[in-house]
Image (cartoon, grey):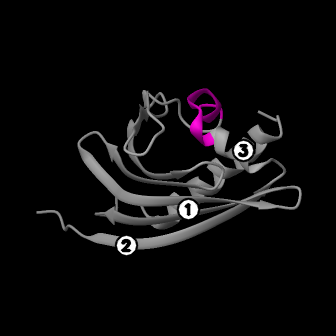
Amino acid sequence: MKERFVKHATFVVERTYAASPERVYHAWADPIAKAKWYSKPDIFDFRVGGREYSSGGPPEGPIFTFDAIYQELVPEQRIVYTYTLDSGDTRFSVSITTVELIEVDGGTKLIFTEQGAFFDGHDTPEVREHGTNIMLDTLGKVLVGEV
């Protein structure tokens, strides 16, 4: 029998964008805008209790499924969601994510905090944090029109 274990972790990633909190929030709240820097959602219901669902991956596989429920939305200030990440029938993790948007001189400071339970070594907090850094860098490029 395969050993089963859970690794709990929290990581925080911060970015400052030369864009208003309204623009940054819109990049999360609009499915067309979000698809420019994140996977194109199959389901996108951006409201408290609403669901975001996407499934995809590279042509050679594997396929990953992101399934989120929005828990708290404060326009231009805060987005909180819980989500699972799966590949096929294997659950990789369950997380709660908080995105804070703080107006600063010349733009927006984004604070991304993820608290996760990572299962059986399928994914690690370090790999997830690395991917989050890439994702938020891509968001920054979209906000300045590079993508």
Which mark, by number, is residue 129?
1
Say few, some or many: other residues with alpha carbon within 10 Å of mark 2 (under 14 / 14 to 19 / 20 or more).
some
> In the picture shown, does residue 17 fall above or below 67?
below
Say few, some or many: other residues with alpha carbon within 10 Å of mark 1 (under 14 / 14 to 19 / 20 or more).
some
Q: Where the N terminus falls, by quadrant?
A: bottom left
Which is more toward the observer, 129 or 111?
Answer: 111
Report helix, strand or loop for mark 2: strand
Which is more toward the observer, 28 or 65?
Answer: 28
Amino acid type at image mark 3: Glu
**Residue extending furthest left?**
1
Q: Where the C terminus falls, by quadrant?
A: top right
Which mark, by number, is residue 8?
2
- Which residue in the structure is indicated by mark 3? 22
Residue 141, by quadrant, is: top right
Amino acid type at image mark 2: His
Distance of label 1 from label 3 (alpha carbons): 25 Å
Which is more toward the observer, 19 or 146?
Answer: 19
Residue 133 among those drawn in magenta = no
Residue at the spot 61% in from the left edge and 27% down from the top edge: 32
